[in-house]
Amino acid sequence: MSAKLVIKNIGLLLSGKIEEPIFDGDCLIAVDGKIEQWGYEKDLDTEGATTTIDAHGVTLAPGLIDSHIHPVVGDYTPRQQQLHWIDSTLHGGVTTLISAGEVHMPGRPKDVVGLKAMAIAAQRWYENFRPSGMKVHAGAPVIEHGMVEEDFKDLADAGVKLLGEVGLGTVKDGKTASQMVEWARKYGIQSTIHTGGPSIPGSGLIDADMVLETGTDVVGHINGGHSALPDDQIVCLCENCKAALEIVHNGNERAALLTLNTARELNKLDQLILGTDGPAGSGVQPLGILRMIAMLSSLGNVSAETAICFGTGNTSRRRDLDTGLIEKGYCADFVLMDQAQHAPGKNILESIQLGNLPGVGMTIIDGIVRSERSRNTPPANKLPELV
């Protein structure tokens, strides 16, 4: 018997699509964890629902995506000695996490055999164990000297699809890094590069010249993680990169706004994606993606619905995911949220553009309710109800 999810009485339907961020409709239907149709309830077949949610007029958006995390194992991070950080992030409306390298593993192996083994293991344990239902794309090896093309084929054959941040290992020259990134791309492995000053012992400065020479798929934390590049180098990257331009919570806020303003001038807002870059020295940020959306919207003068696309559909498209967009056949991963109680603004979008966080009322992953009223966001005016 098919599982049929019906979400009715939606007040605002956000698509995740930067070219059309708001859809018409008050109802959405998913079957067996995949989006089937949406529109107005009167025009849809809502019969036979196995799960019905009354949204009570709140906003439905695709589940948020954190494009830059550093997990280790399960729902634990030794970096901050913290348990259940992934579950806490779910309560911030995030339903998908993408690893930029499991670099905080104590004793992280740096020999070729060891780094491959750890990457494959990390990919496996998050494939087999999803904390609180969260989707964690992990197993992202940091490239080291001594790797050859066959190593990337081995990784890809084992299911590894990501490279950790280029520059966090011993490979710090553009020529070597570019060769390894091309090998990775040949076997379907997506790459990210560290951008800016050193973040952890062993990392180093990665400037605009190396980023451009290396040619990764994602310019990791273009606003620094933590230290940003000089303004002219950030502008240079925005002008010359066709890759995703990733802005992170743990970076330089001024540099984040420079990136946003430059991308807008260049008509490249579709290249902007969001991450937190946690857990890290700055800790864990369960509300990091929501905070970036509110900050960029309020100080960067973009509409809230556009800023939400940075953390949903833009990331989905750049990362080749089947979530983050209201699209037929995509995963039924959603966040239901509303304007926070007593927050200024006439509605949720205006409130976010004034710099306020919304209240998360529910998260759904693969058509299954994973959390209800958030324990981390401010309380919402209205809450959805599992009927």
Image (cartoon, rainbow, N blue to C red):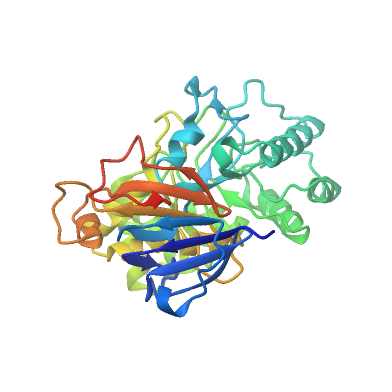
Foreground pick, 247 / 197: 247
Foreground pick, 303 / 119: 303
Foreground pick, 378 / 370: 370
Figure label count = 0
Q: Residue 319: name its quadrant.
A: bottom right
Res 50 seen here: yes
In the displayed structure, 219 sits above or below 129; it is below
Foreground pick, 86 / 133: 133
Please provide percent x and percent y for residue 85: 48, 31
In the displayed structure, 353 sits above or below 340; it is below
- Residue 315 left/right relative to 142: left
In the displayed structure, 84 sits above or below 337; it is above
The residue located at (36%, 52%) in the rendering is 384
Please provide percent x and percent y for residue 372: 41, 42
Please provide percent x and percent y for residue 104: 57, 28
Residue positioned most to the bottom? 43
Quadrant where the N terminus sits is bottom right
Q: Residue 305: name its quadrant.
A: bottom left
Res 262 seen here: no
- Residue 288 left/right relative to 101: left
The residue located at (74%, 47%) in the rendering is 160
The residue located at (64%, 36%) in the rendering is 169
Please provide percent x and percent y for residue 208: 48, 54
The residue located at (70%, 42%) in the rendering is 127
